[in-house]
Image (cartoon, rainbow, N blue to C red):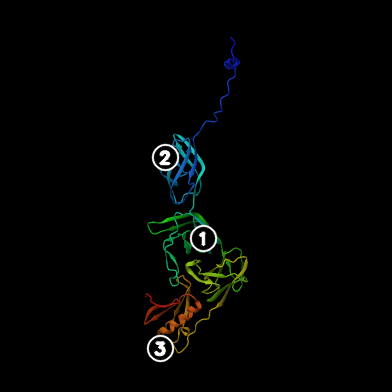
């Protein structure tokens, strides 16, 4: 019996597929072997001095609570490790306030295998620092400090301010600085501080770490910025008597340092600075021979000091707080010989007692107690000074000197120091 054509074709096809000479179909390529890896770290950075939870994600990993994690050094302490799943690890870490900033490798030891994610994580400063001016020996410059840690605003608790409150004092903000540097906070908000730095002539040139300490005692939050600014070394430009020294204000808030050495004898030295620029506000910070801002004598476009002779030294720091730049200026020191005070007769009884200006009084110190204050010694000849005359004279001298003035004398045989500071008269007993 004849078979249908379709059956014959099917049998032929089956026979062909079962032939010993047939070539088998190729298997699909399996690809490279699967290996475990770290594929993510979140967040990717943490600030200095902060404790933070970080999530590490992996591929084909077998994370457990015993998995070891390292963030590139002992300055980042792993406080706790908890496996959320075989491929997700929750890590609590504490960053030292002085940890090295910059990128870090993250290393995870998982099931005996060491997995490393190069540059996956970084340590950052929570403080942005901008210097305006010259950060050098014998300088004044401005600082802007920006808080980059939005979870921890600056504590701007303050006293004073307002119409009659005096200067604003930020009681819960402190910024320690090295010896020879003082820093004043001019204004502060939750995320920005503006300040002014004063650097003594003999301050140590070095990289300076800044640390804004915010909050009440016992609850301080640190905002560290390692090597935030560099104080450079510089020497003063000598001022010759009566000869103007010229300079250029190249950049806003730059400063320049000058020095003046006293000549022979007692001299009154007038300092001044001027500029042809209509926008400039040139000024000099006059410092005593220590070169310390704690011994500031005067700040302004003009100032007067008393030179006691060749051993007397003064420094002048040029600074313009207006922000003007690209202009020239000059600094001048003009000395004038001081005239001695002569006695006037008769002057040997209370009726004929003279005011201080006509009594034998000598200038003893133009930098009394290292503060740029004026001290005079009265040569007592048996007749006490009239106190009202003495006080009036001290007041007049203050108007010239612009710093506190003192008179040392005897009253009823006992030493006494009279002082006028521009606001009030003070009397003080002297030992001996």
Give percent across and percent down for residue 342. Answer: 49, 84
Mark 1 highlights which residue? Answer: 144
Q: CA distance from mark 1 to mark 2?
A: 43 Å
**Which residue in the protein does label 2 denote?**
83
- Residue 29: image quadrant is top right
Within 10 Å of the Cα at label 1, are there few (<14), some (14-19), or many (20+) other Cα atoms? some
Q: CA distance from mark 3 to mark 2?
A: 96 Å
Q: Quadrant of the N terminus?
A: top right
Residue drawn at (53%, 58%), measured in percent from left and top?
130
Residue sitting at 45 percent across and 85 percent down?
355
Q: Earlier in the sequence, mark 1 or mark 2?
A: 2
Q: Is tag 1's residue or tag 3's residue first in the polypeptide sequence?
A: 1
Task: Tell which of 187 and 4 is nearer to you.
Answer: 4
Left or right of 264 in this view: 393: left
Q: Nearer the viewer, residue 365 or 303?
A: 303
Report whether 382 appears left or right of 38.
left
According to the picture, the residue beneath numbered tag 3 turns out to be 350
Location of residue 132 in the rendering, given as x and y in whole percent from the top left corner:
55, 61
């Amino acid at each position: 019996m004849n078979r249908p054509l379709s059956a014959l074709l099917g049998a032929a096809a089956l026979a062909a597929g079962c032939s010993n000479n047939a070539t088998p179909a190729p298997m699909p390529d399996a690809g490279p072997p699967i290996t475990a890896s770290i594929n993510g770290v979140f967040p990717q950075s943490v600030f200095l001095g902060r404790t933070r939870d970080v999530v590490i994600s992996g591929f084909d990993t077998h994370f457990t609570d015993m998995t070891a994690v390292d963030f590139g050094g002992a300055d980042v302490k792993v406080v706790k490790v908890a496996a959320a799943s075989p491929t997700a690890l929750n890590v609590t870490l504490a960053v030292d306030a002085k940890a090295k900033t910059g990128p870090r490798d993250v290393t995870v030891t998982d099931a005996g295998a060491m997995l490393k994610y190069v540059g996956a994580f970084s340590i950052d400063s929570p403080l942005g620092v901008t210097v305006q001016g010259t950060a050098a020996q014998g300088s004044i410059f401005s600082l802007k400090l920006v808080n980059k840690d939005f979870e921890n605003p600056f504590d701007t608790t303050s006293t004073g301010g307002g119409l009659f409150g005096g200067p604003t004092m930020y009681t819960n903000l402190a910024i320690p600085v090295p010896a020879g540097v003082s820093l004043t906070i001019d204004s502060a908000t939750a995320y920005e501080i503006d300040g002014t730095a004063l650097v003594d002539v003999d301050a140590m040139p070095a990289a300076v770490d800044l640390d804004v300490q915010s909050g009440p005692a016992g609850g301080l939050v640190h905002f560290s910025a390692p090597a935030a600014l560099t104080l450079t070394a510089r020497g003063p430009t000598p001022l010759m008597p009566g000869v103007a020294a010229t300079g250029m204000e190249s950049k806003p808030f730059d400063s320049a340092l000058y020095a003046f050495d006293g000549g022979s004898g007692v001299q009154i030295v007038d300092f001044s600075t001027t500029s042809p620029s209509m926008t400039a506000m040139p000024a000099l910070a006059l410092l005593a021979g220590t070169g310390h801002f704690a011994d500031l004598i005067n700040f302004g476009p003009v100032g007067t000091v008393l030179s006691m002779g060749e051993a007397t030294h003064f420094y002048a720091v040029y600074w313009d707080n207006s922000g003007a730049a690209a202009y020239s200026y000059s600094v001048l020191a003009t000395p004038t010989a001081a005239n001695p005070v002569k006695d006037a007769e008769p002057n040997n009884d209370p009726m004929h007692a003279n005011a201080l200006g006509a009594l034998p009084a000598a200038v003893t110190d133009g930098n009394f107690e290292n503060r740029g204050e004026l001290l005079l010694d009265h040569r007592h000849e048996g007749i006490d000074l009239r106190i009202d005359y003495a006080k009036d004279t001290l007041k007049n001298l203050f108007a010239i000197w612009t710093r506190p003035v003192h008179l040392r004398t005897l009253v009823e045989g006992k030493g006494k120091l009279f002082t006028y500071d521009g606001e009030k008269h003070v009397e003080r007993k002297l030992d001996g």
